[in-house]
């Protein structure tokens, strides 16, 4: 499907075979991994997903199924397209199962040490032409790439949440990323119907460099008693025309992910303006991670969300 001229030339020169993306592996079946699987399968690619437990895959597939049903109800896809997309998604019980993938997208928890471990375990099972991408929100692509056996075939492919609805994918080159890796990634992302924006490899790239400090500031606003959860969200929805309030958005992203991104910004840029709000730390320590654990700045266990402060 996606084939670049330069790789074909390399192939003719006997350097390596042409890179054609037809099977995509995804590591992590959480909200991002399942969202990516949704759009990739709907675009005609075969998808294999690995997670720590089969239950995580089952939960992810259920989310894909529900979101596809929503698209049918809106008239944006046919039932047959939903059925074909679901048939293309399979469970990868281990990393060996990625041996026939042309591209593997890592979408596991935002933790650099964990991602290093995943890439180290994954690389021995990949075919030589396989490309690697990380969906990290903030971590250095150069550092992640350096833990693999193919830094030139590694790229940051930062999908936005929720993946089926958001138009943008940020593309981030590491220091070693080759031109054809970039052009293959760009063609692949465009084949999913998404637009790309190119960001340099600096902590949190473009979108989260701007968005997460705003969310962190909203948590400080709550921490300092400037406003209640509801007042802060209402103020930003009605006063700045944001579609969601910043605390509601933090719950949607996941408070653990928000905290990790702020830590990467704070440490990576050595600037106190990025200091994570202690209240955000407290919520994460409590295991109140937002929608995914049913409690964050709002409690989602009842019929409608209720502020937790
Ligand atoms: N949440 C967002 O809004 C958002 C947006 C863009 C990018 N991201 C990035 O996407 C990645 C995933 O975020 P998410 O929101 O989907 O998190 P999530 O918590 O919903 O899902 C993470 C998944 O990774 C799995 N996992 C953890 N360790 C693993 C391992 N060793 N092998 C396989 N699977 C493993 C977990 O079991 C979980 O299912 C992170 O890097 C995050 O920064 C998140």
Image (cartoon, rainbow, N blue to C red):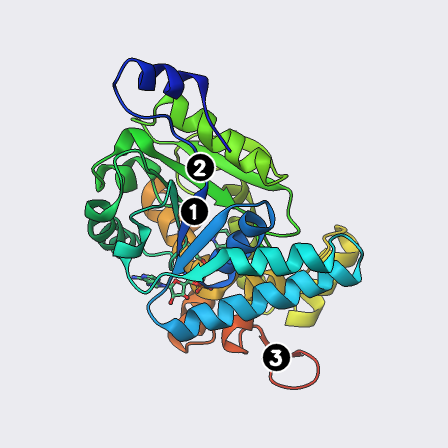
Which residue has dot 3 on it?
Answer: 300
Q: Residue at x 38, y 60 (%)?
A: 109
Q: Position of residue 283 (x, y in %)?
A: 45, 73
User: Quadrant of the rendered structure where residue 291 is?
Assistant: bottom right
CB at disc 1 and ligand 1 closer than 8 Å: no
The CA span between labels 3 and 2 is 40 Å
Decide: is 163 above or below 301.
above
Mark 1 and 2 residues: CB-CB less than 8 Å, in contact?
Answer: yes
Dot 2: within a 10 Å radius of its alpha carbon, few (fewer than 14), some, or many (20 or more) residues? some
Q: Position of residue 59 (x, y in %)?
A: 50, 72
Q: Regarding mark 3 in the picture, which secondary structure is present there?
A: loop
Q: Is residue 226 visible?
A: no
Which residue has dot 1 on it?
Answer: 24
Which of the four quarters of the rendered structure image does ligand 1 lie in?
A: bottom left
Mark 1 and 3 residues: CB-CB less than 8 Å, in contact?
Answer: no
1 or 3: mark nearer the eye: 1
Quadrant location of the C terminus?
Answer: bottom right
Which residue has dot 2 on it?
Answer: 21
Q: Is residue 274 left or right of residue 114?
A: right
Q: Regarding mark 2 in the picture, which secondary structure is present there?
A: loop
Q: Position of residue 280 (x, y in %)?
A: 46, 66
Q: Nearer the viewer, residue 228 or 110?
A: 110
Q: Nearer the viewer, residue 66 or 46?
A: 46
Dot 1: within a 10 Å radius of its alpha carbon, few (fewer than 14), some, or many (20 or more) residues? many
Q: Residue at x 57, y 45 (%)?
A: 44
């Amino acid at each position: 499907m996606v084939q670049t001229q330069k790789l074909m030339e390399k192939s003719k020169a006997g350097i390596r075979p042409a890179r054609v993306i037809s099977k995509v592996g995804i590591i992590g079946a959480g909200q991002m991994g399942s969202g990516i699987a949704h759009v990739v399968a709907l675009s005609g690619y075969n998808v294999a997903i690995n997670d720590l437990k089969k239950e995580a895959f089952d939960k992810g597939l259920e989310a894909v199924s529900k979101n596809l049903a929503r698209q049918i109800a809106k008239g944006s896809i046919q039932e047959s397209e939903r059925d074909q997309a679901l048939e293309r998604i399979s469970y990868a019980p281990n990393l060996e199962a990625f041996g026939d993938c042309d591209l593997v997208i890592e979408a596991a928890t935002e933790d650099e040490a964990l991602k290093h471990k995943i890439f180290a375990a994954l690389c021995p099972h990949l075919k030589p032409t396989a490309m690697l991408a990380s969906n990290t929100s903030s971590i250095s692509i150069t550092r992640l790439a350096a833990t693999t056996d193919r830094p030139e075939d590694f790229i940051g492919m930062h999908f936005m949440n929720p993946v089926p609805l958001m138009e943008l994918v940020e593309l981030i080159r590491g220091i070693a990323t080759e031109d054809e890796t970039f052009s293959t990634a760009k063609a692949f992302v465009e084949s999913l119907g998404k637009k790309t924006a190119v960001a340099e490899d600096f902590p949190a790239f473009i979108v989260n460099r701007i968005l997460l400090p705003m969310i962190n500031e909203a948590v400080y606003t709550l921490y300092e008693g400037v406003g209640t959860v509801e007042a802060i969200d209402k103020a930003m929805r009605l006063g700045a025309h944001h579609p969601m309030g910043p605390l509601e958005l933090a719950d949607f992203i996941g408070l653990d992910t928000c905290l990790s991104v702020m830590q990467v910004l704070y440490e990576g840029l050595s600037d106190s303006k990025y200091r994570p709000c202690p209240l955000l730390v407290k919520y994460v320590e409590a295991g109140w991670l937002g929608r995914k654990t049913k409690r964050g700045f709002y409690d989602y266990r009842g019929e409608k969300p209720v502020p937790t402060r």
